[in-house]
Image: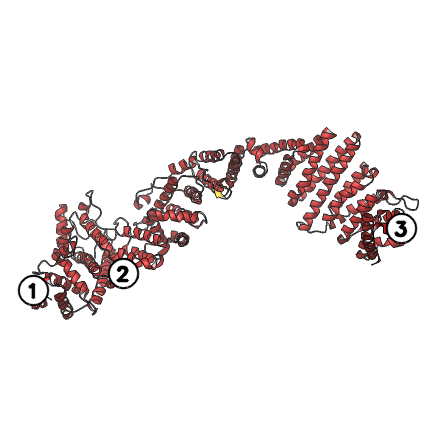
Amino acid sequence: ASFGALTLVIEEVPKDRLTEEQTTFDELLGNREAMKFVGSNESTFMRRSVYRLIRIIMLKCPELVRDTYRVMAQALLSNCFAEADPNAHGDMWDAVLLLTKSYPQVWAIDEGGKKAKSVASRLFEFLGSGKCRLAPTISYPSILALLANLPPAIVDDMSFQAAFGDALWKGASTTGAEPGSRAYHQENVGLVSAICECFSFLWARALKASADNTVAVGKAASKEVDRLWHFYLQHSESFEEMAVPIVKLYEKIGTLSIKYAPELLEKVWTHASWFALQRVIGDGTHPIVYLITQIMQLGGGGVLVADSARKLVVGFCLLAVQSEDKGISQRLIQALSQLAPDVVFQEGFSAKFSARLEGIGSQQEAIDLVVSRAQYLADTSVASATQSIDAFIESSLQPASDAGWRAVAGILAAVSESDLAKTNGEWRRDARLPLLEQALVSGLPSLPGGADEVLSSSVGAPSAALIRAHGQALLGFFRGAELISAQAANDLFSWGCRVFQLYYEMQWTRNVTQSVNLEAWTGATCEVVSVWITLSRDEVAGPRFVRNWLSQPAGSLGLLFDFATTSTGDEEGSMRAKVHPQARRCWAAAEAQVERLGMGLQLAQALSTAISGDVCDLRAAKDPRHLARLAHAVYSRLCPVEQRAQLAHSWAVAARPWTLAINGDAQAAGMSADAYLSALCTAGSSGLRQAVDDHAGVSRSFHTLTHWTAAATRPASGPAFDVFGLSLLARHAMFASEFVRLSGLDVGAGEPEMVAEFIWNMTLAFVLLRESLNAGEAHDGPCVVRVDGDPRLFGRIDGAAQSIQDIVSSLLGSLMLDRRDPSRWLAILAQHAAGQGDAEGVWAQVVSMCIERSESVWGLVLGTLAEWAQWTQPLDSADVESMLADPLARYIEAPVSSVPRAALLVIV
């Protein structure tokens, strides 16, 4: 407390006032008993109080101790270097440095006429004990300040310098910090910084003082630099921080060589080069290359050192190329490419490095090197950068192989993640790779025309490496880095869609599981879907990719939706199960993007178009019931509520698809629509079969897939049936009935015209299927319709007929029992039958053909309705009579006068 109070007094009282009390201060500060507290082992607080007292005296009024400084110095310097409390190091060093600056002679004090233990030896003990490492950020920086204020006779003594260095290195091995800890790191960096700074100072003084010191300085420099290198590699976890002071030391050596001793640098560098070359082939590769490349960047006085360092880096490059040890080559190439790109790329080592890496199987590292070189070139010329990448791609694909395509995929992935693809955060549009585009487009394998050809042993699946290369090119394109043109991107995407479509078709092909190519095509398809997943999930590419997908023909979207939403447990689903998980992930990613973009309606429309096209395609090999399930999923999950009625109408009720289906059946039979309907409705299956046989000139069974073969071979004709034994009309009716059932669509609530059209069309399909089943029972055995020996066709046709019958029956029943307006739709049907309000005249002729034996329009209508009632069996004859007679009398006015009411009742 007394020392603290005295310190406060000196700090606050003016200097001239203090000198007035010189005698008092002499008595106090010259008192050995008072100063002995600086060596107190009991109280750090007391020692720090003495340190602070000395500090404030030296700062404010060092003259106060001009007669007593010896007592103070002896007390301080004989005890301070034993300080073991790191909390006191700051105060201790302040006292020592300020006292030494004001009274440097204290470092040569005699005690009692005899030579006391030198103060320098106490300093060396302090340094060697490792106490500096207790407070490395305070003690190590203070050492240079101490050297700068020591008397020249001491500091310029080479023996002092040697002992000083030995003491520092001795203390380096003593630490209480945990290796790898932050404290351990600070200790090591502080030590290296102190050694480099202090010896730069000492060697400069020695050379400046006398040229005779050159040899001694050279030896000392070689010794200390060697110690530094060893310590640097032993503690390489801190190599970047330790390299900073070491580089400055080399810069100082270069400056001293220019000014005083040219041979100094040669001597020091020769030893360092030998050491670096010996250790660079071990585990010290990266730290050594880092340090040498940092030295290589020196300018000014360090230019000579930098030139030597560059030559050493070239030597490292040669070693990397020529070493037979793969590990050494790989480590050196990694370090040199990262740390010395100027030498690697300017001296022509990049190509040699790439070849060496490929030779040892490090393909990805070779790719990284190519990208690094391109980035290096891009700083001056983007064209040169892209040409270098194109050249690598061209060489990798000579000839084209899986390894080459893997290299292309790797280089594109690396480019997308590099600065070459962006500038100021924006995707570059000037980084076009023409050779890449040419290789991708010309390398597209030709694909088979259908699933049967795919599954033949002669057709191999596309390689996964090729598909991944496509994916990386598309990813870059949709991110905005136009490495390829829009046309090339569209070609790649369309090709992938075709691969997916072929795999989809395979699942409907008989004996698919026997194909030796199945696994390969499954793998290729999974790769295509993986590409789509990556594109859809990418934050930048995803929205652009999905927008583009929706603008394309909807085939691949529809197939993906099918795979993603359909259970894998059905009979045809064994192949589906292999792709189903990825398809689900892909669809989820694409659907999420659609939701963000607000394009749900566009997606529903695209899928609707795809599904409608499949319904009308006899070659599509897709069960119409399955397509109806997909349609219902689109209707219920994707389509906006306000658009659902329109979508449902286009699938189930709209007249155009029905008309196209009837015309397609007629064309396949080689007949006009009128003749086809006449044969169907007038004479049933036998009449239709006879009409077909007459046209084809041969006799065929009506109930096998080949019964219209002769007619179908004409260029204008297509197949008559799909693989399920269904014609276009039957397919569409089966699809519509299943969709109505799943969606719960209330057809009867629509406009009367719509209701009438729906009943009419569904009835025609039912006639076709019913007559087919009847004929099948008569011609092909009991209730079996054979298709290449497959008895399942009968079941499918029977199921389709039953589904249609259920829908029409339910609809007729609900309409007839609706007392609110039970007759409007009947009037519409009657008008069709009479040829009124029918633009094409097809429906009127259908009804007329069905009941041509009737003698009046009333008979036509009632006969037709009676047949419907009979097929669907919703009512007995009394119900038919009571429900039909009165509405017809009220709504069909023109014929009423020509047919008595009693006659109508008789016909009913």
At x 39%, y 49%, the residue is 546
Q: Identify the secondary structure beneath mark 2.
A: helix
What distance separates the C-alpha of mark 2 from that of mark 3? 115 Å
Give the mark, 2 or 1, whose residue is nearer the N terminus.
2
What distance separates the C-alpha of mark 2 from that of mark 1? 40 Å
Can residue 79 be seen in the rendering of this structure? no
Q: Is residue 54 above or below residue 896?
A: above
Q: Residues within 10 Å of mark 1 (few under 14, many from 20)?
A: few
Q: Nearer the viewer, residue 707 or 511?
A: 707
Give the mark, 2 or 3, whose residue is nearer the N terminus.
3
Marker disc for residue 740: 2
Residue type at numbered disc 2:
Val
> Which marked residue is nearer to the observer: mark 2 or mark 1?
1
Where, quadrant-wise, is the N terminus in this rendering?
Answer: bottom right
Residue 506: x percent and y percent?
Answer: 32, 48
Residue corresponding to mark 3:
22
Residue 363: x percent and y percent?
Answer: 50, 39
Q: Identify the secondary structure beneath mark 1.
A: helix
